[in-house]
Image (cartoon, helix red, strand yellow):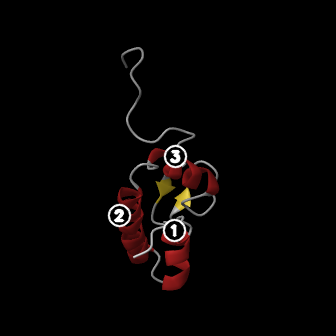
Amino acid sequence: MTPGVRASGPGPDDHAPVTPDWNCGSCGDEWPCATKRGRLLEEYQVDRAALSIYLGSCLAAATQDLRSAPVLSLQARFIGWLPRSGRTF
């Protein structure tokens, strides 16, 4: 490999999901783990709609892999932790 070029794929501290169990590849907790949640909020701080879409797509994939898990618990796990906006309509 060329010096200074990172190999493709998640690194040891990326806290990426490992499917089909949807556990964190770094810490072993359910994904998104606490560390990944913090990183996602920081990464998407100016575009929370994109974060919601990303996590919604992860939720959709996880429901296929985790068929025996209750849907409400998967919703809480993947999108229920997102901060609510302060907007009023």
Q: Measure the C-alpha gap from mark 1 to mark 2.
A: 15 Å
Q: Quadrant of the N terminus?
A: top left
From the top left corner, tell me how far across and down residue 28 is, in percent.
63, 56
Q: Residues within 10 Å of mark 3 (few under 14, many from 20)?
A: few
Tell me the amino acid under the disc marked 2: Ile
Q: Is residue 76 above or below residue 16?
A: below
Residue at screen point 42% across, 17% down: 4
Rendered image: mark on residue 84: 1
Asked if one can make out residue 70 in the rendered structure from this viewpoint, the answer is no
Residue at screen point 50% across, 64% down: 22
Mark nearest the camera among 3 and 1 is 1
Tell me the amino acid under the disc marked 1: Arg
Looking at the picture, tell me which residue is in the foreground, 46 or 67. 46
Residue at screen point 49% across, 69% down: 79
From the top left corner, tell me how far across and down residue 6 is, in percent.
41, 27
Asked if one can make out residue 23 in the rendered structure from this viewpoint, the answer is yes
Q: Secondary structure at mark 3?
A: helix
Q: Is residue 22 above or below residue 72?
A: above
Does the CB distance between marks 3 and 2 fall below 8 Å?
no
Q: Which residue is mark 3?
A: 42
Of the residues under marks 3 and 2, which one precedes in the sequence? 3
Does the CB distance between marks 3 and 1 fall below 8 Å?
no
From the top left corner, tell me how far across and down residue 78 is, in percent.
50, 68
Please state the total of marks drawn on the protein image. Answer: 3
On the picture, is 26 further left or further right than 51?
right
Looking at the picture, tell me which residue is in the foreground, 43 or 16. 43
Q: Secondary structure at mark 1?
A: loop
Tell me the amino acid under the disc marked 3: Glu
Of the residues under marks 1 and 2, which one precedes in the sequence? 2
Rendered image: mark on residue 53: 2
